[in-house]
Amino acid sequence: MASELTVQTLRGPTSGANANKIIVSSGNTFVPSVGQVVNVQRYSTSTQVDHGSSAFTNVWAVYYTPILTNSKIIFSHNVSLMSYRSNGAGARINTAVNINGSTVQYDNNTHVYDYGGNGVWAKAMHSNTTEYSNTSGSQVSWGYFTSCADANEVKFNEGLSSSSLIVTEIAQ
């Protein structure tokens, strides 16, 4: 038979099937300790976006609503990019990650440069991690942007490729 107890601090049992666990029934709020992971969400897309612009283009946007009003949010992405250039030496591109409209990560002239100059293409997975300090609990926008440096075109999720984003929220 289960029992209920109203207290400020709880410690789980040290042995048995529920060792070091505290079970919080529905309708109650659990306040996590600092450094504890409170939520993990995975987003993925296989939508292909192609463009040939030297201006940054948002090729993927994700919106995350934090569980807490004071937390660190870690965004870990793994995206598929292909670029090409016909009759030229480079198929380089630029990439950027924006959080709430501000650039927090930028890579300049990534991909490939062919000194032969007869045309080139490159396809690769790009991975990186960015952090955001959540102090309000308001929705957070995350965006992945690409632009052509000297490539004719950049393709996000070319062919049957897909990209993923893992969002981890940690109590502060």
Image (spheres, rainbow, N blue to C red):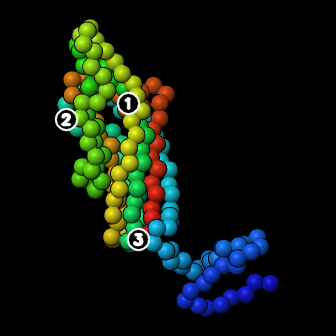
Can you identify the residue that label 1 sits on?
81
How much space separates mark 3 and mark 1, taking CA atoms?
Answer: 34 Å
Q: Residue furthest bottom?
A: 6
Label 3 neighbour load within 10 Å: few <14, some 14-19, many 20+:
some
Choose mark 2 or mark 1, whichever is in front. 1
Label 3: which residue? 172
Q: Amino acid at mark 1?
A: Leu
Q: Position of residue 147 (x, y in %)?
A: 24, 33
Earlier in the chain: of badge 3 and badge 2, it is: 2
Tell me if residue 107 comes above or below residue 39 in the rendering.
Answer: above
- Say whether residue 8 is left or right of residue 128: right
Q: Nearer the viewer, mark 3 or mark 2?
A: 3
Instruction: Return the disc, 2 or 1, that comes first in the chain's sequence.
Output: 2
Q: Residue 25 or 120: which is nearer the viewer?
A: 120
Amino acid type, callout 2: Ala
Can the viewer see residue 122 in this picture?
yes
Horizontal and vertical percent position of residue 57: 26, 38
Disc 3 versus disc 1: nearer the observer:
3
Element on which disc 2 rests = loop
Q: Reading the chain from its start, which is encountered first: label 3 or label 1?
A: 1
- Please give the name of the residue rendered at 30% of the width and 22% of the height, measured from the top-left corner: 112
**In the picture shown, does residue 42 fall above or below 56?**
below
User: In front: 166, or 11?
Assistant: 11
Residue 144: quadrant of the picture: top left
3D distance between C-alphas at marks 3 and 2: 37 Å
> On the picture, is 123 further left or further right than 28?
left
Residue at image point 49% right, 28% down: 160
Q: Is residue 53 above or below residue 68?
A: above
The answer to which quarter of the image holds residue 128 is: top left
Q: Which residue is mark 2?
A: 55
**Residue 139: % across, % down:** 36, 62
